[in-house]
Amino acid sequence: MKSKRISAFVLAAVLLLGCALPFGVLAADGEDAGDTPEEPVAISTVEEFEAIESVGNYYLANDIDFGGKTYDTWVIQNFSGTLDGRGHTIWNFTVSSSADGERVEGGLFQYIGSEADTVIKDLQIGKPGENVQFTFADAGWAYGGLAAAHGSASYALAIEGVTMYADVSVSNGNNINVGGFLGASMNCVMRDCALWGSVSGATTNSWINVAGFSANPKKVTGGAFERCVNYADITVSNSTTARAGGIVGYAAYGINLTGCYNFGRLSVANTEEGKEVVNARLGGIIAENAAADRTGVYEGCINFGEVVSPKHAGGIVGYNCKDVTVKNCINFGVLTGADENIPVGAIYGYSESEIVAEGNKDLSGRFGDPVSDALGTVGTQTTAPEENRFDIRFLSTVDSRNYHAVGFDVEIFCMEDGTLVSRTLRLTSHRVFESVCAKNAQGEDITVEAAELGGQYVNAISVFDVPTEADYGSITFVFRPYAENGDTVVYGSTAVAVYNGGTLVFTAAAA
């Protein structure tokens, strides 16, 4: 299938159809923290990156190609302080280890935040089609693409605006935590981060936690995950108790999840003959909540990914052990449990304790049709808000004119009196365009050819007079292009656009 992907954190180069606002996400607003030097040190080469000290204040001056280098276990062993990517990318390297029974933990960093408050921000690791490979087969307990673990409960960790293209694979005989970003974390806040690729873990021991962002948030006093998006497929194997979550694996302490999205497929792959998976707990957002302090709140999260489990499967929470609040969350993902006697649920698979559920929506499989190469999701375009209203246009590319109608299936979500409400639209037109009139970021009139957007033609449909937050708060549009030819209907990929006050603050799309 052709790659027509919307980046969740990149502004569009062209503003289409007349008006005003860029296609992207608001920048993170975190501040530098910790007792690190005031003047940051520039990093512009591989050698300078490898020379990062255990405590320091650094920034990337440019993109860095590592030239295909392979590292044993980690690139940097310990780091605390500030690493500001300034929008730059590091790529073209591999981290791998096989230590024959020695206990080691690995990632880009082995440990972060052990000696001071730490901020890592505005950094891209890997590139589309050039995932960084992290492969481990030794006796450690935690592994992650960014770091094995956040190493101290005494210091805060903030990861903001970091995007990873990575494949993380771990196999050993220990109880292990495997994360696309972090194997284990403590006082960690992650904001506006994204993961593409895959995360997999296998063990012959009693349990394993696998997740896109943190497999095991531990000893949390300030843990939160905000607007994080997982596109990676998550696979867990060979353990008596197997947990897998799109964002978080096993939460033994209270964490908050706000506005997080999962597009990845979660599944169990039993690769050892005769090995029985007794407990499989898979959730689109979180595998299992076991927070002893019962403070967790999961709010405004959406799962689009398929969840396939031989036991428990949940669109938001796979398995719940303690009281938790789940509110205004939505599941679009198809859920499958191999054992018909084990609960499978659109919001949660099973709960031993009370779940305070408010305003959640079960839309399982609503956008489950296969994706066609003939349609590509481009995004949205809006007018500037005026008198608490704005206009929105949905855009897609079309690779044929052999359709009698094109359009979008749209779900609109907003808050009304504190409750999530929704509306379903099917927007249909009968025209596509070889080019469109547009304005660029400077407000100048231009013409954009369909080929510049990745297709032969452009489909554009408007929804007018949308209320801003003065009436309802933020508004989420979940939309998918379709095209009809007789009895044949084809679909493009699903996309999400969130507006606050008529301003686009978040976008994401399935890979």
Image (spheres, grey):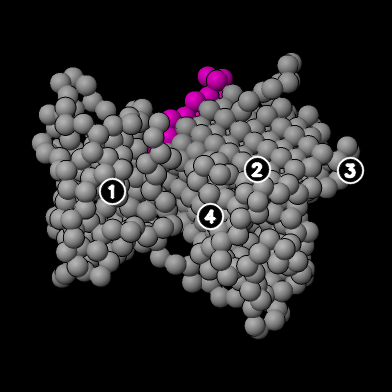
The answer to which of marks 1 and 4 sits earlier in the sequence is: 4
Q: 92 or 290: which is nearer to us? A: 92
- Taking the spot 40% from the left edge, 39% from the top edge, the residue there is 3
Three-letter amino acid code of the residue under disc 2? Gln
Query: How much space separates mark 2 and mark 1, taking CA atoms?
Result: 31 Å
Q: Is residue 295 left or right of residue 452?
A: right
Count of marks overlaid on the render: 4
Query: How much space separates mark 2 and mark 3, taking CA atoms?
Result: 21 Å
Query: How much space separates mark 3 and mark 1, taking CA atoms?
Result: 52 Å
The answer to which of marks 4 and 3 sits earlier in the sequence is: 3
Q: Nearer the viewer, mark 3 or mark 1?
A: 1
Three-letter amino acid code of the residue under disc 3? Glu
Q: Nearer the viewer, mark 2 or mark 1?
A: 1
Residue located beneath label 1 in the image: 452
Q: Nearer the viewer, mark 2 or mark 3?
A: 2
- Taking the spot 17% from the left edge, 24% from the top edge, the residue there is 485
Q: 442 or 313: which is nearer to us? A: 442
Query: How much space separates mark 4 and mark 3, taking CA atoms?
Result: 31 Å
Query: Which contiguous range is marked in magenta?
Result: 331-346
Q: In which quadrant will I find the N terminus?
A: top left
The answer to which of marks 3 and 1 sits earlier in the sequence is: 3
Label 4 near label 1: C-beta < 8 Å? no
Neighbourhood count class around disc 4 (C-alpha, 10 Å): few under 14, some 14–19, many 20 upward: many
Neighbourhood count class around disc 2 (C-alpha, 10 Å): few under 14, some 14–19, many 20 upward: many
Residue located beneath label 3 in the image: 102
The numbered mark at residue 163 is 4
- Taking the spot 18% from the left edge, 19% from the top edge, the residue there is 487
Residue located beneath label 2 in the image: 133
Q: Residue furthest bottom?
A: 38
In the rendered image, residue 409, in percent from the top left (x then y), is placed at 24, 38
Determine the secondary structure under disc 1: helix
Three-letter amino acid code of the residue under disc 1? Glu
